[in-house]
Amino acid sequence: MNVTQDLSFLSLITNASIVVQLVLLILLLASGLSWYFIFGKMFAIRAAIHEADGFESAFWSGVDINNLYQRTNSGRTPVVGMEKIFEAGYREFLKLKRQGRMDIGVVMDGTRRAMRAACQRELDALERHLAFLASVGSVSPYVGLFGTVWGIMNAFRGLSNVVQATLAHVAPGIAEALIATAMGLFAAIPAVLAYNSYSHDVDRLATRYDSFMEEFSNILQRQPNP
């Protein structure tokens, strides 16, 4: 540690020990990745909510299910979210019905399995990278605390070579150490807030998907001959 009276942010970082600088670099990278995933997930979840709203409006508008399936299955636009669940379920329903005299219970079981599988794939895509945000939110403060402890330890070790210790000798070392704590919080707080918000949004979408699958199953059960 170099004792210096310059307590500017840049000077504290450049004069910090290698360990503290490494901690700051790790936290900076974690923070950058977090913000990348935060914005990416924000757009993905907004798109999923918008898609669910639009498809539910179309589905409950009284349109014929066969026409809706043909439009969905046309390949003109990517099929995602609730529309993907509908497509997977109705495709399986038609396939099983074409196999002949099959009990409606067996048909509906296969249809529900197809919809659940499609639902799980959609939720997995929405939940991707949320675990990283949770990890950054929980680990970053401790990484920053490690840098702080190391920096303070270095500051006090530097006092061993000083005949008369003053605040001017220890202040730079403590200041550089506290930067690591601040950086840990800077990385952790947005990640925790984003994780909590996005997890809530994904849970709400999962509930909407489950409700749609139950309602759609009831509709299909009343239509044994599509």
Image (tube, grey):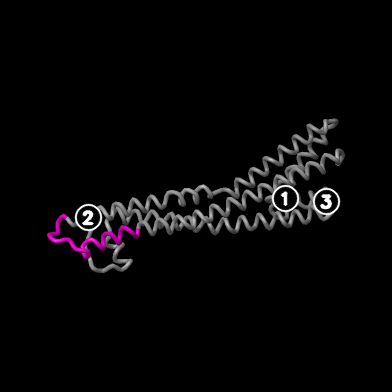
Q: In the rendering, at what x and y percent does residue 146 appear?
A: 34, 50
Q: Residue furthest right?
A: 225
Against 99, is 123 above or below? below
Label disc, if present, on residue 156 of the rendered structure: 2
Query: Counting other residues with Cα less than 10 Å from the Cα at mark 2, is it few (<14), some (14-19), or many (20 or more)?
Result: some
In the rendered image, residue 30 lying in the magenta stretch gets the answer no
Of pointers 2 and 3, the one earlier in the residue sequence: 3
Query: How far is the residue under mark 2 from the one under mark 1?
Result: 63 Å
Q: In the rendering, at what x and y percent does residue 168 appear?
A: 22, 65
User: For the residues carrying marks 2 and 3, which lies nearer the camera in this image?
Assistant: 2
Query: How far is the residue under mark 1 from the one under mark 3?
Result: 13 Å
Number of residue marks: 3
Instruction: State the extent of the magenta-drawn residues as a range.
Output: 160-179
Query: How far is the residue under mark 2 from the one under mark 3?
Result: 76 Å
Q: In the rendering, at what x and y percent does residue 13 appear?
A: 31, 62
User: For the residues carrying marks 2 and 1, which lies nearer the camera in this image?
Assistant: 2
Q: Which residue is mark 3?
A: 67
Label disc, if present, on residue 83 of the rendered structure: 1
> Which image quarter is the N terminus in?
bottom left
Residue 17 located left or right of residue 165:
right
Against 212, is 162 above or below? below
